[in-house]
Image: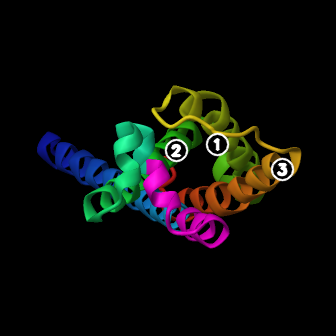
């Protein structure tokens, strides 16, 4: 085989791996974002989208309007895609993450909940107005485990090309 053929084959494999990475991250992240936003809207009403926007722009987000609703959805999807990218990157080194998506997805969802509660929410412009009850904390933990962790884990497990 000539050197050009080997280089061409490597480029083709590289493109295929990049495509599968984008597909895995996209499917997992977008499904997780859609399910999480749907369950949040069912539990808290559609104003929760404005609360997400308020996390970036402060009290201006409570005004409502198409811009702030759109901003809330975009921010929510961005955060979900970031978590999916992180899961994908970890799964490249820790192969068991794609072999056992149920257990790993549930654990990852719990980790997502902890990151949101301990890192993201305390550093955003939105400030919690009342303390979170233990029931609310457990409900949020279980929701993130199921509607965020599992879609991301199964998306990466199903669509990521094993290297």
Question: Which residues fall within the magenta stretch?
Answer: 35-52
Q: CA distance from mark 3 to mark 1?
A: 13 Å
Q: Nearer the viewer, residue 95 or 139?
A: 139
Q: Residues within 10 Å of mark 2 (few under 14, many from 20)?
A: many
In this view, the residue farthest toward the left is: 4
As drawn, the label of residue 138 is 3
Which residue shows up at 35% across the image and 59% down it? 64
Q: Secondary structure at mark 2?
A: helix
Q: Secondary structure at mark 1?
A: helix
* Image x and y of residue 116, in percent: 61, 38
| Residue marked by disc 1 | 112
Ranked by sequence position, the earlier of labels 3 and 1 is 1
Q: Is residue 135 left or right of residue 161?
A: right
Nearer to the camera, 157 or 117: 117
The image shows residue 71, relative to residue 120, as above or below, that is below
SS for dot 3:
helix
Q: Is residue 108 left or right of residue 86?
A: right
Per the image, the residue denoted by label 2 is 83
In the shown orientation, is residue 69 left or right of residue 119? left
The quadrant in which residue 93 appears is top right
Q: Residue at x 26, y 45 (%)?
A: 10
Q: Earlier in the sequence, mark 2 or mark 3?
A: 2
């Amino acid at each position: 085989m000539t050197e050009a053929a080997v280089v061409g084959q490597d480029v083709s494999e590289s493109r295929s791996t990049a495509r599968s990475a984008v597909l895995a991250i996209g499917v997992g992240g977008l499904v997780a974002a859609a399910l999480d936003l749907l369950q949040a809207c069912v539990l808290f009403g559609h104003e929760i989208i404005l609360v997400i926007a308020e996390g970036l722009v402060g009290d201006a987000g409570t005004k409502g309007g198409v811009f702030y609703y759109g901003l809330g959805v975009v921010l929510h999807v961005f955060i979900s895609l970031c978590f999916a990218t992180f899961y994908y990157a970890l799964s490249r080194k820790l192969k068991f993450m794609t072999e056992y998506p149920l257990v790993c997805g549930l654990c990852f969802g719990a980790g997502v909940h902890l990151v949101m509660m301990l890192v993201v929410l305390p550093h955003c412009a939105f400030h919690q107005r009342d303390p979170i009850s233990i029931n609310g904390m457990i409900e949020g933990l279980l929701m993130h485990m199921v509607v965020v962790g599992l879609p991301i884990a199964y998306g990466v497990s199903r669509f990521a090309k094993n290297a």
